Amino acid sequence: FNAIGEEREIDREEFTPGIEPQPTWCPGCGDFGVLKALKQALPEVGRTPEETLLVTGIGCSGKLNSYLDSYGFHTIHGRSLPVARAAKLANPGLEVIAAGGDGDGYGIGGNHFMHTARENHDMTYVVFNNEIFGLTKGQTSPTSPKGHKSKTQPHGSAKEPIRPLSLALTSGASYVARTAAVNPNQAKEILTEAIQHDGFAHIDFLTQCPTWNKDARQYVPYTDVQDSDDYDFDVHDRVEAQEAMRTAEEALYEGEVLTGRFYVDETRPSYQGEKQRIGEMPETPLAERYFDDDYEWE
Ligand code: SF4
């Protein structure tokens, strides 16, 4: 059964546009891994292209919705989350996914990231983290390591990188995970969980950029924190999750790639749930009221 109760198989190829060109990402780009995982995850949760909205920001990652046959909105730099929030509020029946790069999401749209997490909007947010601005030819981004040399920081970055997992947790996200394009099975599993999660699900998706990241970081070998005996923490415990995130964020720049679920809170209501609870959100979604000629507006 799909999400609206139809009994039919949903095939990942339904999400492949018939008329668009093939992806123009560079050979070896991690962005291919996100696209593949997304095409696998959506049928897994029973969503069809007509039930899915993909909102993207600016950057190589922003091309994602050209290659996924769903509703799409390619918005301006750093603004995928406000557009995604508005769409979800107007039509809660849509499966809303927002996506963008680390510069787009953690830098230019950083404020939106914090507040969408704080308000726990029901959507999935995929951040392609390649530690660089790729589309504009390799400038330092908020996740570039300290000392990283680029055209904008020729003497090496003097800045500490942002800690996206910790930022998501402290801002209020109810699902926080990290996966990597080089780990397709885990990527699909985590995306599936994130889409099914009721609330704001943030995925820091490590996507290598072999063209502009001069360190040629490929994020291998990686360790799944759920599979490894070296990491034992309760993803439902905020304090333990915070400590695990701190370990993962420091390890990344020392060459150890830790991926997996870091925090899951299934008890906190989403923003939409809270709005309905206090009576601010009518049961009939705005999108349905708008097209209902008989609806009596107050
Ligand atoms: Fe991918 Fe980097 Fe090429 Fe952009 S520039 S498509 S991020 S490899």
Image: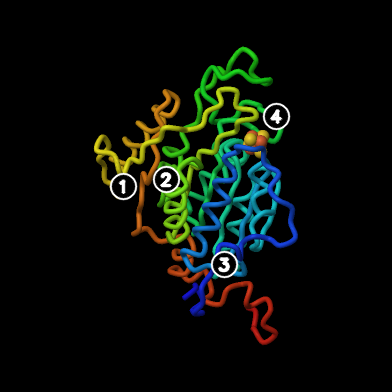
Mark before the other along the chain sequence, 2 or 3: 3
Q: Give the residue type that dot 3 points to.
A: Leu
The residue singled out by tag 4 in the image is: 137
Q: Does the residue labelled 4 lie within 8 Å of ligand 1?
A: yes
Q: How many marks?
A: 4
Circle 4: residue type: Lys
Task: Name the kind of residue labelled 1 in the image.
Answer: Val
Q: Earlier in the sequence, mark 3 or mark 1?
A: 3
**Residue indicated by mark 3:** 94
Q: Distance between the residues labelled 4 and 2?
A: 28 Å
User: Which numbered disc flags the more N-terminal residue, 1 or 2?
Assistant: 2
In this rendering, position of residue 38 left or right of residue 183: right
Instruction: State the residue at coordinates (51%, 77%).
Output: 8
Instruction: Find the distance from the CA under tag 2 to the CA under tag 3.
Output: 22 Å
Badge nearest the viewer, 4 or 1 = 4
Q: Name the residue under label 2.
A: 177
Alpha carbons under labels 4 and 1: distance apart: 37 Å
**Residue 227, horizontal then vertical, whole percent:** 30, 43
